[in-house]
Each structure stands twice: as structure tokens, then as C-alpha cells.
């Protein structure tokens, strides 16, 4: 029986010629990731297991990014605990404030993940690296601990859903709109326990930053992983960022998929997910009049340079609507610096937005932009659950950087095209 | 191994942000986490939950974040078992790894209401609704999972195996 991309990567890492859905395997890990929230639990478990050292100092990445710069004393203690562990274990990929970034923006940028890799991370958005043609998935702290100790993890081989992308996206439509459109179509458990595999001629019109956004949100459809077919854009990205050797896995011609969806990208419209589920989507033409209090642009979903460029294209020369708070988070220090050199940061500040250091901050209601009772935010992040960004009676509307930036100018959820035509 | 208790009943897509809101993730202490368990979906949960009680929910329980704090908070609040139609996959792994028994059984979910008294036999997978006198059958845990549960989680299980 033919195998999917995911199944091929899993088989290769388990030392098997082939695997099939439902099979339990033990696979070798190329990278084990944790952050300041999940690592402290993992480190305690790691010690309880009696492990003396990590399996490979080059294959563990610890990124304090959630409550950093330390938001309170407890957060500071958690970060110190992770820092001391990283030092004592001589973990090579520990990134302190100043060299860090949001983990899922940072690892690809540092070249730590390449096509064909198998990565686990104690963060649900670890699935982001599927954009590179790698298998990556979120796990909990105990799995992270076992991964750090042994370099291995058990998996149940997933079946898969194939998404064949066709046509060219129009106007402001981005990876965010495409993935929100897909989640709206299949639901928040539409890919539960499964892989989402993206391919087709439409792929050529989606940038690497757009693919990271799409793979990042595979978990919002319940998927085990999201993975993209490797093409010239992937190779170009990997060559520019990494020196690690890589392997390209393509699905067999007779690979079995549970379902196949054809997505005509030319028909996808800017899409917004209304509270309180990422699947509660409407096209920009259907949103109606939604007044907002805050705009967040950034996160592991949409904090990359292309996202900031799009936001700047709209905000440059315009002003944030009086009374609306706009907070922009570049994903990494590198992205921050590039945005600074390109003049984007200046354009944001001139427009009346604040620009923050990289942090997960407000995305999960941690710090740096919490919502009060009854407040509404348009956010380029990934979840809009009850209380996700603050008070349980606040609301989060998920959207692309273009829609978020246009909404910042008008104070209500806005189609960027409408804003530009009005000028 | 058996569990018996009163049921807290929830619907689809109970996410990890309502099980334990991120604002409390500056600690990993189970007792502190339990003090805020289910706070954003059911503010009375912590006040009313008693040791042994059971959570019953519909589809995709535990969706969202990978935070192990979510099953830790549920377990530390005294809940003996979670029964759902389906679980989100990371939550499923985490619950097993920390030794929180969970069962997938759609029929049971349909036949159990809030406040019902329910008994679960993990060896047989039999779920009894004592209030309504009905019985359901979930797939029992395989042997290795039973041993992980008995050892109170994967870490202890590994330790007892190596000792």
C-alpha cells in the first residue's frame, strides 16, 4: 500500500520500510522543543525519570517565549528553572531574551528544522514546521521529558486528508485566509488524529511565510500534523537558513487518503473566524458591522516579515482609529531588525501602533494586551476560545494581517479593498 | 480499578483554555492549578467537585494547547475519570501519561446527564449510570495503559520498570 508524506517520514525514523495507519511505532527524534510554560513540567519529569543528561545537546531547543520578558515573579522563576537546566545540560539551542523569538518563528529561521525531519515540541503549534516538509507535532511535557531523555517517541501512524490547491489567490488573500477557509469547511475536529497534506499547482502562489501560517493552524482542525509538498520555494528557504542535510519525501502515487479536497484558491475570500471557535468563519463580505477595541498583529501564526510588510502597506500614511489599541509583535529579533531596516517599524509608530518585543504575550492572554470584559479584538493569532485573550466576556476575531491592519484604521472589521477604495 | 462519582456534564470542544486558563500557567503546582480548574466554563466546578467525580463531555474534549497542566488540573481536583465522545489527540496522550483515566464512549455520553451517579470499571470498560439504571460499554484499556494508570503515570511506570 502506498504511503503519504507523513507515513514515509515516520517509517524512515522508525527504521521500517513501510507503515500503515493505526500502527504503533517508536521513532527517532531530530529535535525536541519546549518553552517556558511546558519545559518546567518536563524538566521535573526528566529528573524523576532518573535521566542524567539529554540524549543530544544539539537536538534539544528551549525557547522562553510565552511569559517573557518575565511578566511576574512566578514567570521569572519558571524561566530561571529552564535557563539553569539548559546551562547544566549544555543545551546548544537555548535562546535568551535578546536572541530569541517566538519558538515557531525562530526554529525555521535558525535552520534547526529541515525537510524530512521528525520534530516533537511541548507546544501545540509545533505543527508549524510541516511547511518545510517535515513531520512535526505537539506533545505534552511528559512526552517532551521522555524525548529529551531517550531521543525517541512513540506514535500511532495517522491516516491523512489531502488538500489539492488550485488556482491563484486574489488581492489580499493570504495563507491565513486559506487555512481559516479550510478550518471553516472541515471544523475544529475535522482532521482529528489525522495528517493534513497540502499539494497541487496552487502551492507555487503561497510564500513560505504563508505556508508556515497554514501548517501552524493544522492543530485548529484537530490534526496531528500539517505538511506541505517540498518545492523550489522550500529548497530556497532551507538553503538560505540551514546547513543541515535534508531529505525530500513525496507521497506515493497510490498513497491512500481518507478524503481529498480540491481548493480553488482564486475563489477564497479574506476570511474571519468569529468567537469562539476557529471554525466559526465568515468571509469578509459577510462580517457585518463589528466594532473593535484592539488589534493584534503577530504571533507564531502571523508574526513573520511578510505579515509585517502587508500590515505596513496598509498602515503606512494612515492613522489608527482614535480609541483603538494596535499592538504589533515581530516574531523574532531578526524579523524585528529586518522590519526596522525596511522602515516598517517607523511606519507602524507613525500610524499610532505600538511595537513589542517578540513574545507570545497576548495571544494566550498572558500579558502585553489583555482584554477587559466586553472588549473585542481583531487578531492575527490562532485561537479565539472563551477567555483566550483575557476576560471570559471578551471576544477575539481571527483574521489575516491585511484585514487586521485595515480594521485598525476604521475601528471595525474591514475589507482592505474597501479601505483602499475609500481613500 | 473502578471509579464512582457524580457527573459534571459539558458539550463539544471543551478547550484547554477553559480547563485551565493561561493566566494561571505561571505555576505547575497541581494544587494551585486545581483551584482554577474549569473556571472559565463552569465557575462553580471547583466549589462543587468531590473526590471521585466524573466529567462527561461530547466531541473533541481538550482541544487547543498542549499544556499538560490541563489534565493535571482535572486530576488534582479529584476527578476520577473523563468520558467523552472523542478527545483531542494531545490531551489524550497527556492524560494517559499523567495517569488520568479517560474513555471514549459516545453511547454513554448520550445516556448521561449532569448530576447522574456513574460507576466505571476500567478493567471491563463497563460504564453504569446508577441514577438511570443504564449500562454502556467502552473499549477497556490495553494492559500497558492499565499499568501506567496503576503506576499513577508514565514517569512512575518507567521508574518502577527500571528499578
Image: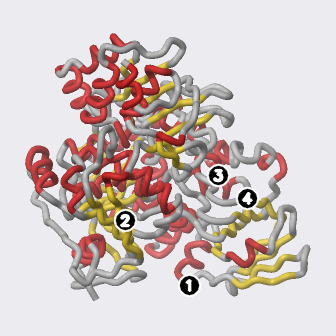
Residue A353, given in percent of the width and then of the height, sits at 40, 17
User: Does residue A311 appear in the picture of this structure?
Assistant: yes
* Image disc number at residue A196: 2
Q: Nearer the viewer, mark 1 or mark 4?
A: 4
Query: Is A181 left or right of B103, judged from the image as shown?
Result: left
| Distance between mark 3 and mark 1 Cα atoms | 26 Å
| Distance between mark 4 and mark 3 Cα atoms | 16 Å
| Distance between mark 2 and mark 4 Cα atoms | 28 Å
Query: Is B85 left or right of A404, judged from the image as shown?
Result: right
For residue A250, what is the image quadrant?
bottom left
Q: Nearer the viewer, residue A200 or B149?
A: A200
Looking at the rendered structure, whether the residues under marks 4 and 3 are on a common chain is answered as yes
What chain does badge 2 belong to?
A: A
Q: Is residue A409 above or below residue B114?
A: above
| Distance between mark 1 and mark 4 Cα atoms | 29 Å
Q: Which residue is mark 4?
A: B10
| Distance between mark 3 and mark 2 Cα atoms | 31 Å
Do callouts 1 and 4 mark residues in contact (Cβ within 8 Å)? no
Looking at the rendered structure, whether the residues under marks 1 and 2 are on a common chain is answered as no
Q: Nearer the viewer, mark 4 or mark 3?
A: 4
Specify the quadrant that holds the N terminus of chain A: bottom left
Q: Residue visible at 80% across and 74% down?
A: B111
Q: Is residue A125 above or below residue B135?
A: above
What chain does badge 3 belong to?
A: B
Residue A301, given in percent of the width and then of the height, sits at 37, 43
Q: Which residue is mark 1?
A: B143
Q: Nearer the viewer, residue B140 or B89?
A: B89
Query: Which element is circle 2 on?
Result: strand
Q: Is residue A372 above or below residue B157?
A: above
Q: Which residue is mark 3?
A: B73
* Image disc number at residue B21: none
Amino acid at each position: 500500500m502506498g504511503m503519504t508524506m507523513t507515513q514515509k517520514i515516520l517509517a524512515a525514523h522508525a527504521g521500517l520500510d513501510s507503515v500503515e495507519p493505526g500502527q504503533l511505532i517508536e521513532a527517532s527524534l531530530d529535535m525536541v522543543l519546549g518553552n517556558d510554560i511546558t519545559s518546567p513540567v518536563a524538566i521535573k519529569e526528566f529528573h524523576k525519570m532518573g535521566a542524567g543528561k539529554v540524549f543530544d545537546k544539539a537536538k534539544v531547543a528551549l525557547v522562553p517565549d510565552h511569559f517573557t520578558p518575565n511578566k511576574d515573579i512566578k514567570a521569572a522563576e519558571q524561566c530561571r528553572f529552564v535557563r539553569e537546566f539548559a546551562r547544566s545540560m549544555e543545551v546548544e539551542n537555548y535562546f535568551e531574551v535578546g536572541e530569541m523569538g517566538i519558538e515557531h518563528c525562530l526554529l525555521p529561521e535558525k535552520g534547526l528544522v529541515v525537510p524530512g525531519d521528525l520534530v516533537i515540541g511541548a507546544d501545540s503549534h509545533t505543527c508549524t514546521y510541516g511547511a518545510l516538509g517535515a513531520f512535526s507535532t505537539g506533545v505534552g511535557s511528559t512526552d517532551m521529558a521522555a524525548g529529551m531523555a531517550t531521543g525517541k517517541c512513540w506514535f500511532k501512524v495517522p491516516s491523512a486528508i489531502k488538500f489539492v490547491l488550485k488556482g491563484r489567490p486574489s488581492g489580499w488573500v493570504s495563507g491565513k485566509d486559506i487555512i481559516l477557509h479550510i478550518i471553516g469547511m472541515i471544523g475544529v475536529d475535522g482532521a482529528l488524529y489525522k495528517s493534513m497534506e497540502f499539494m497541487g499547482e496552487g502551492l507555487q502562489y503561497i510564500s513560505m511565510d504563508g505556508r508556515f501560517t497554514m501548517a501552524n493552524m493544522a492543530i485548529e482542525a484537530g490534526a496531528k500534523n500539517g505538511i506541505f509538498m517540498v518545492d523550489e520555494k522550500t529548497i530556497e528557504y532551507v538553503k538560505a537558513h540551514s546547513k543541515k542535510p535534508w531529505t525530500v519525501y513525496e507521497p506515493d502515487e497510490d498513497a491512500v487518503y481518507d478524503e481529498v479536497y480540491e481548493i480553488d484558491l482564486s475563489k477564497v475570500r479574506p476570511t474571519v473566524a468569529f468567537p469562539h471557535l476557529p471554525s466559526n468563519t465568515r468571509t469578509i463580505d459577510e462580517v457585518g458591522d463589528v466594532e473593535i477595541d484592539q488589534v493584534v498583529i503577530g504571533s507564531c501564526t502571523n508574526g513573520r516579515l511578510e505579515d509585517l510588510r502587508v500590515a505596513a502597506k496598509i498602515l503606512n500614511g494612515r492613522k489608527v482609529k482614535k480609541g483603538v489599541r494596535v499592538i504589533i509583535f515581530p516574531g523574532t529579533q531578526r524579523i524585528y531588525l529586518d522590519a526596522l531596516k525596511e522602515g516598517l517599524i517607523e511606519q507602524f509608530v507613525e500610524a499610532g501602533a505600538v511595537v513589542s518585543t517578540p513574545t507570545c504575550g497576548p495571544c494566550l492572554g498572558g500579558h502585553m494586551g489583555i482584554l477587559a470584559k466586553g472588549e473585542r479584538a481583531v487578531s492575527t493569532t490562532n485561537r479565539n476560545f472563551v477567555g483566550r485573550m483575557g476576560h471570559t466576556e471578551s471576544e477575539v476575531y481571527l483574521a489575516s494581517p491585511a484585514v487586521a491592519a485595515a480594521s485598525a484604521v476604521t475601528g471595525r472589521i474591514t475589507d482592505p479593498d474597501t479601505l483602499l477604495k475609500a481613500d | 480499578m473502578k471509579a464512582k462519582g457524580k457527573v459534571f456534564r459539558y458539550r463539544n470542544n471543551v478547550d484547554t483554555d477553559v480547563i485551565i486558563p493561561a493566566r494561571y500557567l505561571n505555576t505547575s503546582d497541581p494544587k494551585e492549578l486545581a483551584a482554577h480548574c474549569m473556571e472559565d466554563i463552569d465557575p462553580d466546578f471547583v466549589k462543587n467537585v468531590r473526590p471521585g467525580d466524573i466529567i462527561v463531555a461530547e466531541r473533541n474534549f481538550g482541544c487547543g494547547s498542549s499544556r499538560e497542566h490541563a489534565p493535571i488540573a482535572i486530576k488534582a481536583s479529584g476527578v476520577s475519570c473523563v468520558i467523552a465522545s472523542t478527545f483531542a489527540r494531545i490531551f489524550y496522550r497527556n492524560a494517559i501519561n499523567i495517569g488520568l483515566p479517560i474513555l471514549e464512549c459516545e453511547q454513554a455520553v448520550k445516556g448521561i446527564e449532569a448530576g447522574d451517579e456513574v460507576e466505571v470499571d476500567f478493567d471491563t470498560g463497563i460504564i453504569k449510570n446508577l441514577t438511570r439504571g443504564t449500562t454502556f460499554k467502552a473499549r477497556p484499556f490495553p494492559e500497558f495503559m492499565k499499568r501506567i494508570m496503576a503506576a499513577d503515570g508514565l514517569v512512575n511506570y518507567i521508574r518502577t520498570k527500571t528499578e
